[in-house]
Image (cartoon, rainbow, N blue to C red):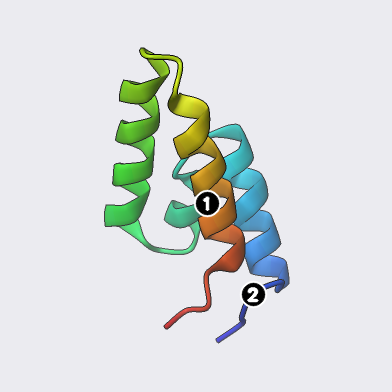
Amino acid sequence: MPGQGSGGNVLAAICSFFIPGLGQLVQGRVLIAAIHFVLAGVLWIFFMGWLIHLWSIIDAARFTGK
């Protein structure tokens, strides 16, 4: 399984850059993808969604497959 810094993780991080949770969905992690997407949507209402958005990008990039 590819680890941190692999091409798949870079692609996932780019996907999460555009839509929070999309990178996790690309990696096959449906539950965490839904959590990132919903949290980002809810928190954008309070202008704090950028925190979840950033977390989503970093989480997708650092995923090791374990």
- Locate residue 55 relative to residue 5 in the image: left or right: left
Helix, strand or loop at disc 2?
loop
Q: Is residue 63 above or below residue 1?
A: above
Q: Position of residue 45 (x, y in %)?
A: 36, 12
Residue 46 placement: quadrant = top left
Q: Position of residue 2 (x, y in %)?
A: 61, 82
Identify which amino acid the numbered label 2 is placed on: Gln
Identify which amino acid the numbered label 1 is placed on: Gly
Residue 5 placement: quadrant = bottom right
Farthest residue, direction bottom: 1
Q: Is residue 10 above or below residue 23?
A: below
Indicate which label's residue lies in the foreground, 1 or 2: 2
- Locate residue 39 relative to residue 14 in the image: left or right: left
- Cα separation between marks 1 and 2: 13 Å
Q: Read off the residue under disc 1.
A: 23
Q: Tell me what residue is drawn at x 53 percent, y 78 percent.
A: 64
Q: Quadrant of the image for the N terminus?
A: bottom right
Q: Position of residue 23 (x, y in %)?
A: 52, 51
- Locate residue 39 relative to residue 59 in the image: left or right: left
Q: Quadrant of the image for the C terminus?
A: bottom left
Q: Read off the residue under disc 2.
A: 4
Q: Position of residue 38 (x, y in %)?
A: 30, 33
- Locate residue 52 relative to residue 57 in the image: left or right: left
For disc 2, the neighbor class at 10 Å (few under 14, some 14 to 19, many from 20) is some
Helix, strand or loop at disc 1?
helix
Q: Tell me what residue is drawn at x 37 percent, y 42 percent.
A: 36
Q: Earlier in the sequence, mark 1 or mark 2?
A: 2
Front-most of residues 13 and 48: 48
